[in-house]
Image: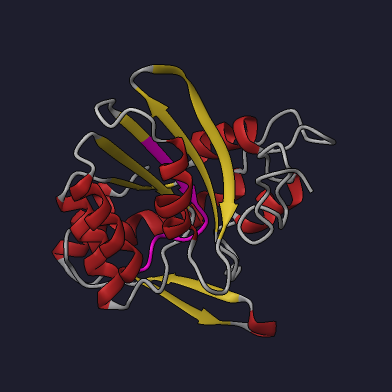
């Protein structure tokens, strides 16, 4: 095992070169299934360094990927506190309410950091603590969006291990779930009732349905087009 290789956060489905395996990416970032694992693909750009830092990590039983990034990854990468930093996360699940609070506290202490978050799914989207957490991040300038097809392609080209990899990745079949999660995210950020229902079908397969009952939800649907 190479020096500095973290068995907990950076081992399962991730190469020592910081790439995620093809199989892990396809399985983990598929919005039509509800995988329990949370993965993060991240990109750090510093104003005093033209070369971005790109890598992957995942949650463990004791620590979510967001907290590992803030307390470990960022602290090791930071060199000049005066330099502006642009961080992009591509996460298989949106941050939970507790993580949102720690992210907000971190950003208040780091005024030179700008955070962009792309999510494949929304974590326990009906729980108010999670909904309010995402709104709080938006209110301090964090950009939060659902991953859409060009983003999947970018992640494939940037973070997926090249061994036995398809030349390109354009999962058109994700489009219905991208739209559903985009609508729900807009409902969350606009503080209107949830529009997304997820239930268990045959063999515990998740069934997604849309519930639009009022004008507020209809306006959210209009603005949710990715």
**Where on the picture, by quarter, is residue 19?**
top right
In magenta segment, residue 52:
no
Residue 130 occupies quadrant? bottom left
- The residue shown at (75%, 51%) is 23
Residue 147: x %, y % from top left: 46, 46
Picture layout, residue 90 above or below residue 185: above
Quadrant housing the C terminus = top left
* Viewer can see residue 195: no
Q: Residue at x 27, y 68 (%)?
A: 131
Residue interval drawn in magenta: 87-96
Name the residue at 70% across, 83% down: 203
Q: Give the left or right position of residue 168, taking residue 122 as reference.
A: right
In percent of width and height, residue 4 lies at 65, 46
Viewer-proximal residue, 13 or 25? 13
Residue 15 seen: yes
Q: Residue at x 21, y 51 (%)?
A: 138
Q: Quadrant of residue 12?
A: bottom right
């Amino acid at each position: 095992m190479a020096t500095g290789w973290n068995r907990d956060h950076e081992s399962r489905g991730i190469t020592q070169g910081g790439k995620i395996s093809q199989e892990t990416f396809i399985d983990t970032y598929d919005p039509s299934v509800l995988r329990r694992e949370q993965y993060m693909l991240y990109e750090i750009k510093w104003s005093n360094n033209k070369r971005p830092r790109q890598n992957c990590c995942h949650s463990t039983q004791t620590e979510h990927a967001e907290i590992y990034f803030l307390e470990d990854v960022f602290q090791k990468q930071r060199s000049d506190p005066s330099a502006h930093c642009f961080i992009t996360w591509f996460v298989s699940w949106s941050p939970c309410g507790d993580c949102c609070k720690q992210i907000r506290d971190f950003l208040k202490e780091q005024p030179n950091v700008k955070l962009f978050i792309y999510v494949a799914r929304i974590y326990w989207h009906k729980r108010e603590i999670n909904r309010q957490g995402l709104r709080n991040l938006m209110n301090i300038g964090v950009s939060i969006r659902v991953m859409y097809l060009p983003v999947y392609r970018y992640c494939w080209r940037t973070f997926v291990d090249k061994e036995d990899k398809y030349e390109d990745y354009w999962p058109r079949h994700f489009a219905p779930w991208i739209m559903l999660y985009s609508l729900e995210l807009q409902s969350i950020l606009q503080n209107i009732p949830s529009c997304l229902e997820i239930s268990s079908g045959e063999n515990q397969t998740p069934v997604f349905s849309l519930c639009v009952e009022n004008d507020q939800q209809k306006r959210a649907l209009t603005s949710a087009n990715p």
